[in-house]
Image (tube, rainbow, N blue to C red):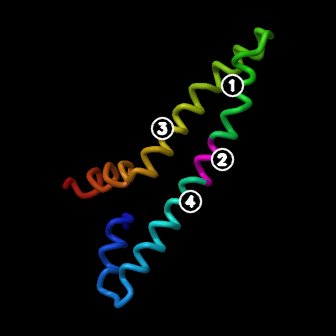
């Protein structure tokens, strides 16, 4: 169930605007906290990437690909695009 579907279901309640505002705020907090965590996880890769040691640079280049793929998956999940893709693959519509 996507976030917009959840909001649509809640609009039938008496305090729909308050509930929708609370859900929007919760979504923003979760997105902010997870974005901060991802930024913290990128720090060791960046430090090794700009290191003078060639071994650290090489390992950072290898880890860079995995970190980038993980970040793209995170962005797709938070934007709802990943849900839409899986819904299309499952239902064909």
- Image coordinates of residue 47 in percent, x first then y, are 74, 24
Q: How much space separates mark 4 and mark 1, taking CA atoms? A: 24 Å
Residue at x 64%, y 47% (from the top left corner): 36
Give the mark nearer the N terminus: 1 vs 2: 2
Quadrant of the image occupied by residue 83: bottom left
Q: Are marks 4 and 1 in contact (CB under 8 Å)?
A: no
Give the mark nearer the N terminus: 4 vs 3: 4
Q: Quickly name the residue at label 2.
A: 37
Is 43 rendered above or below residue 80? above
Q: How much space separates mark 2 and mark 4, taking CA atoms? A: 11 Å
Q: Quickly name the residue at label 1.
A: 46
Q: Are marks 2 and 4 in contact (CB under 8 Å)?
A: no
Q: Quickly name the residue at label 4.
A: 30
Q: Characterize the local packing of mark 3: few (<14), some (14-19) or many (20 or more) Cα atoms within 10 angstroms.
A: few
Give the camera-side residue of 38 and 32: 32
> Regarding mark 1 in the picture, which secondary structure is present there?
helix
- Image coordinates of residue 54 in percent, x first then y, are 76, 9
Give the mark nearer the N terminus: 2 vs 4: 4
Give the camera-side residue of 83 and 80: 80
């Amino acid at each position: 169930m996507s976030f917009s579907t959840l909001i649509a279901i809640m609009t039938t309640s008496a305090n729909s605007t308050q509930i929708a505002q609370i859900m929007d705020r919760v979504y923003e907090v979760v997105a902010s906290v997870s974005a901060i965590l991802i930024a913290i996880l990128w720090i060791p890769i960046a430090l090794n990437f700009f290191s003078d040691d060639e071994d650290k640079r090489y390992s950072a280049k290898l880890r860079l690909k995995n970190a980038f793929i993980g970040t793209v998956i995170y962005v797709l999940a938070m934007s709802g695009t990943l849900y839409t893709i899986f819904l299309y693959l499952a239902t064909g519509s």
